[in-house]
Amino acid sequence: MPEPALAVVLGGSGFLGQHLCRSLLAAGFRVRSVSRSGAPKGSGEPWSSQVEWVSAALGTPEAASALRQADSVFHLACTTLPSTSNADPGYDLESNLLATVRTLEAAAAVGVRRLVFVSSGGTVYGPARQVPIAESHPTDPICSYGIHKLAIEKYLHVFRVSNRLDSVVLRVANMYGESQDCSRPLGAIAHFTGRAVKGQPIEIWGDGRTLRDYVHVDDVVGALVRAAAYAGKERVFNIGSGRGVSLLQLVEMLRDRISTPVTVKHLPGRDCDVAENVLDIGRARRELAWSPAVTLEMGLERMIGAATAGPPPLAAGSA
C-alpha cells in the first residue's frame, strides 16, 4: 500500500493551522507543521501527537528542508497584523514577503505539486468601489499587511507562468472560531465575545458602522482542502460569508444572546480600516463547490459557549 501523501502546513501551530492539521489528518494525510514555535504549548489533544512539528522560521534553510517529499503546502504563516503592519513596513516585508519568496524557491526545487496561500480578502482590495467585492475588483491596499499579501500573490503568479510551482490563492475574510484567543486584538468576534462574557466594555475603533464579512474557521478549512485538490483554471478565490455586518450590529447580536449588560467604548478611528468589506463568493461556490456552512448566528452561539466554558480546546501557538 502506498504511503499517504504528505501535507506541509506553514504556520500549523496557529489558530487556523491547528484546525487545518486536524482536518488533514482526518482526511488521511501525513501532516508536517512548520512554525517558529514548533508544537503548540499545552496541546493534549490526541490528533496533535500525529503531527510532525518542526520549529523553524519561514524562509530559513530549516523551513526549506521541511518541504521535502511534500505533495501539498499550505501557507498560513504571517508575522504581522493589519492594524500594526504600517508601524514597521520593512519588518513586514522582510519577514513575510522575502521569507515567502525563499519558500517558493525551495518548494519549486523539491517538486511540490500545489501550494495554497492564505491571502487577505479584508486588506488586499483597499477601499471598496462596489459591494460585494469580486476577485476582479481593483487592489489598492492601504496597509503594509495588504501590500505584502498582494505581492506574494504576484510572485505566485510568476512561479505559475514559468511552470515552476502551481498554486491557488484564497482571499479570506474576517475569520473567527471557538478556539481563537479572545485576548488578542485580532478578530472582532473573538475579542468582542471575550470581553462581553467577562462584563468588560467592548472597544470599537471609530463609530462602529464599518461593514465586515465574517467567516468561521471550519468553513475556511473546508475551502483550503478543496483548493488543494482543485483541477480547474481559476487561481484566486474569495472566501467569506458574502454578508456584511457592522460592528454595532455585531454588538447587538451579542446583547441578544448574553444575559449580562454589554457596554461599548468608542476609540478614535484608524487609518488602516476601510469603511466596508464584503466579499463576493460566487467563484468559490461555482469552481470549488464550496459554500459557508456556519452562519454568523450559529457561530456566535458557539463562541459564547466556548468563552463561557473557559480555555479553548486547541493550544496557543505562534505561526
Image: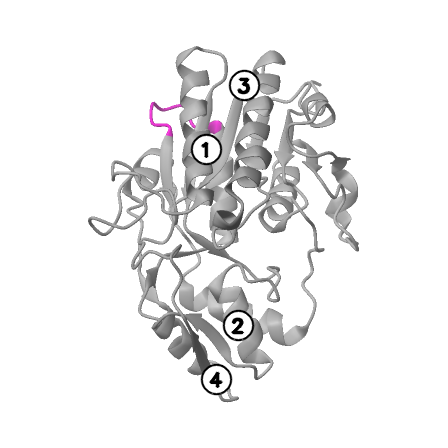
Q: Residues within 10 Å of mark 1 (few under 14, many from 20)?
A: many
Tell me the number on the disc at residue 113: 3
Q: Which of the two discs, 4 and 1, labels the residue nearer the N terminus?
A: 1
The reply to whether discs 4 and 2 touch (Cβ–Cβ < 8 Å) is no
Picture residue at 40% right of the left edge, 22% below the top: 157
Question: Can residue 116 be seen from the camera position used here?
Answer: yes
| Residue of label 1 | 227
The reply to whether discs 3 and 4 touch (Cβ–Cβ < 8 Å) is no
Q: Residues within 10 Å of mark 2 (few under 14, many from 20)?
A: many
Q: Quadrant for the C terminus, please.
A: top right
Q: Which of the two discs, 1 and 3, labels the residue nearer the N terminus?
A: 3
Residue 218 % position (x, y): 52, 51
Residue 148 % position (x, y): 46, 36
Amino acid carrying label 1: it is Ala
Amino acid carrying label 4: it is Val
Q: Which residues are magenta?
A: 229-235
| Residue of label 2 | 193
- Report helix, strand or loop for mark 1: helix
On screen, residue 53 above or below 19: above
For the residue pair 203 and 291, the one nearer the viewer reads as: 203
Picture residue at 58% right of the left edge, 48% below the top: 16
State the separation of the CA atoms marked 1 and 3: 12 Å
On screen, residue 73 above or below 203: above
Total numbered labels placed on residues in the image: 4
Amino acid carrying label 3: it is Arg
| Residue of label 4 | 262
